[in-house]
Image (spheres, rainbow, N blue to C red):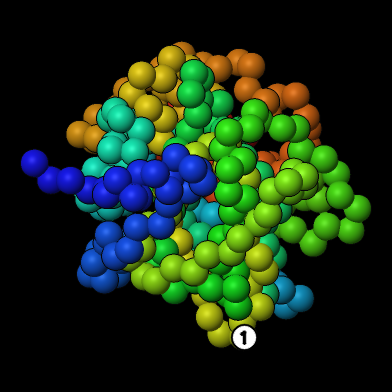
Amino acid sequence: MTVYVTQEQRDFFTENGYLVVKRVYRQEQLTRLCEEYAAIWLQLLASGQVKQQAHDPFASLYPNRLRDFHQDNEGIRDFMMEPSAIGVLKELIGEEPIAVQSGFYYKPPGTRGLGYHQDNYHIGVSPDTSYAIWVSIDGADPENGSLLFVPGTHRLELASAEVVAGSTNAYSSEILRVPEGYKAIQIETEPGDIVIFTGNTYHGSTKNKSRYRYRRSFVTHFAPQSTDKVTLNYSHLVDTRGSRVRRRLNTRSKIMETQPSVFHYHDTPYYDQFIHKKQQPHSQPDKG
């Protein structure tokens, strides 16, 4: 039987709420995924849904996130369910995961960072929490905006976001402050590395300060199979066999308590318009 994580890795995840696993994906897999999203991006560009703006030429050309295209794309779905990545997550959480949503990030030069947040604030997995597999497509470091984590915060409850005056983070000025007694760290990753973290772990990213480097990544948020309720895509979850499954709608998600929110997705209109032109979807993506 294949063992995907060592006891040392398991202990690190339990203690810190995140784990970096090196070179889970091969370069050819990363290339194929980028080709799938390049085709989607070209269709968005050709249809006029993506338009370059002179004042912000990079960021306007690349939607902040291309969300949930795995629902209608077998290649993306296969990438998302890579057995080695799923094997790591399964061993860490002790059961089969089911995919809730996916997102592809270009993060071109000049793109703002994202303030500290907790994913399950908007995903609404109950009981337990959500779990993310974040795939580093390009190398990521402080220059091009790699991930920030606050170790140990996975043990905290979900906290409501607060408005921080003058924030330069993406989406809005609502972010979570690093709790007293905790310290943030910034990680570096290489192409093919994955980062797994819980939906309660405080995390974010810094601005892409580079002149020419992208920081492409692909993230899937999962729920444990035993999950009873979820807010996002509750009728369009995907199990590890690629089959669509359902869970009950969590109507008490934290995101419903505070609007607008750091999780107000600017990218969803791209998804809605593209899918409607392509084919009628099984279900509409939640607006967060």
Q: Is residue 157 left or right of residue 20?
A: right
> Which residue lies at the image location 32% right of the left edge and 63% below the top edge?
22
| Quadrant placement of the C terminus | top right
> Which residue lies at the image location 61% right of the left edge and 60% below the top edge?
185
Q: Position of residue 274 (x, y in %)?
A: 48, 48
47 to 71, vertically: above or below: below
Q: Quadrant of residue 145?
A: bottom right
Q: How many discs appear?
A: 1
Q: Is residue 191 visible?
A: yes
208 to 255, vertically: above or below: below
Q: Which residue is mark 1?
A: 211
Q: Quadrant of residue 170?
A: bottom right
> Which residue lies at the image location 66% right of the left edge and 65% below the top edge?
206
Amino acid under disc 1: Arg
Relative to the observer, which residue lies in front, 16 or 207? 16
Badge 1 marks a residue whose secondary structure is loop
Relative to the observer, which residue lies in front, 121 or 183? 183
| Quadrant placement of the N terminus | top left
> Which residue lies at the image location 35% right of the left edge and 33% below the top edge?
93
Relative to the observer, which residue lies in front, 170 or 152? 152
Q: Is residue 280 visible?
A: no
Relative to the observer, which residue lies in front, 279 or 136? 136
Q: Position of residue 171 (x, y in %)?
A: 72, 51
Residue closest to the far right:
165
161 to 213, vertically: above or below: above
